[in-house]
Amino acid sequence: MHIPLPLLPVPPSWFPGHMMKFTRMLPSLLTRTDVVIEIRDSRLPLTSINRSLEGALRKWRLERGWDANDPTRRIVDAGPCERLVVLNKRDLVPEWGMEPFRLAMARKCPEQQVIFASWQRPRDIRNLSKTLVDVAHKYPHTPELNVLVIGMPNVGKSTLLNALRNMGIKGKTPKAFRTSAQPGLTQALSTRLKLSIDPLVYAFDTPGVMLPFLGQGARGAERGVKLALIAGIKEGMYDNETLASYLLYRLNVLNPISPAYLSLLPQGTQPTIDAGEFLTKLARRMGMVKRGAELDISRAAAYFVRWWREEGGLLTASSDFPLEMGRLLNEDDGPTIDSEDGSRNVTHGWGFDFQWQLSYKELAAAADKDKSSIMDSLIQRKMEDCIEQYLIDSEREDRDESNISATQRKKQLSMEEKARRRQKYAKAKR
């Protein structure tokens, strides 16, 4: 039996006017930008990519002299033009997957320099600050380095900039930007924030920008729930029971042997793939009862999601690679699936964007402590496959003209009708 993906609702459309305004402003902003820092969430390193901004970033690089056919080669090097991808909140993903992910991204997206960071780790902030200073020193004739920080809502842009300012400028510095656990607090381009005095480095904070449309079918539905779990979507667009059922599924994938949610249940409880069963046990464990002595499942779901955001994520990230997964392949009731060649595989993953199947042979090699490099290369290969599939699916979605929301379609039809009327009026006037 494998770990089934729960039934998920159609993703909502949340694309306020200030997001559209910034999307239109981006090309002109890039003309005075030297470094783009794209901040993503480490738990969603692929889902938190905003593909609607990719076209403007690609054009910016080409105009600054980067080779269209070789993203690692620069034809004209007249000034700074760097793109840094900062995976924020690194403390919420397991350490064992970071280096394989960085190497996998270097192979699949060589134009992006990937940096893991957390504002709670001074060393990470210091390294990021040093990276910006090194870029400035590389171009001594540039009087100042202008940095544009972009990303989806609630990935930590303002928080990270406040930490960079405190690290780069000596003495007590006031908090420059307001921060919030709710998405959408920053709604306009900020004034320039000084990050370093020598050399001069300035940064702009920008509004978090969602995808105008999260996608069709199961892929779009799953993307929406992932973003809602990290509070990247306006609260209230998903009910907590939907989020809880998907969270249970993901925690089972991350560690099929001892998922983090077991710490909420009585000792000796076995993992489950049934969300209703889990929430019933959790409500009973926490004494969540409604009038009439009925268990409050909705309250248990809200508690489960809140627990994961506040402490469960840290607990999940602290776990090592579950080498004992091999025993599941010898059990009839474990979360395994039979492959086409008749061998048994176990479902596993890293973060909420990576999921793969591991065979007994692969697990046996990974379990050999003297061959840790084999495990790293195995994980890297699995991640490369996931990234490749993401790129293929994204390109297919971008080409699909029907991959737009109902609201976007109405606007599109309205604009076409107005264009026809203008053309008809122009002909009549002649």
Image: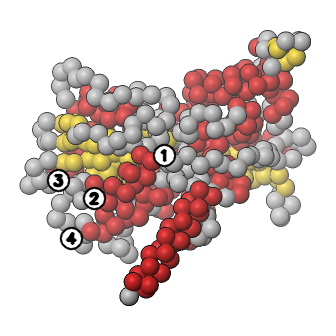
First in sequence, mark 4 or 2: give its number.
2
In the shown orientation, is residue 348 left or right of residue 169? right
Counting other residues with Cα less than 10 Å from the Cα at mark 3, is it few (<14), some (14-19), or many (20 or more)? few
In the shown orientation, is residue 378 left or right of residue 34? right
Give the numbered dot on residue 76: 4
Q: Position of residue 37 (x, y in %)?
A: 34, 48
Q: Position of residue 14 (x, y in %)?
A: 55, 46
Provide the secondary structure element on which disc 4 rests: loop
Q: Where is residue 313 in the image (x, y as percent from the top left)?
A: 59, 30
Residue type, numbered disc 4: Val
Provide the secondary structure element on which disc 2 rests: helix
Residue 386 visible in this rendered orientation of the protein: no
Looking at the image, which is closer to me, 238 or 172?
Answer: 238
Residue type, numbered disc 1: Pro
Comparing labels 1 and 4, the label whose residue is closer to the camera = 1
Residue placed at 22% from the left, 23% from the top? 173
- Residue 208, image quadrant: top left
Which residue in the structure is indicated by mark 2? 28
Give the numbered dot on residue 138: 3
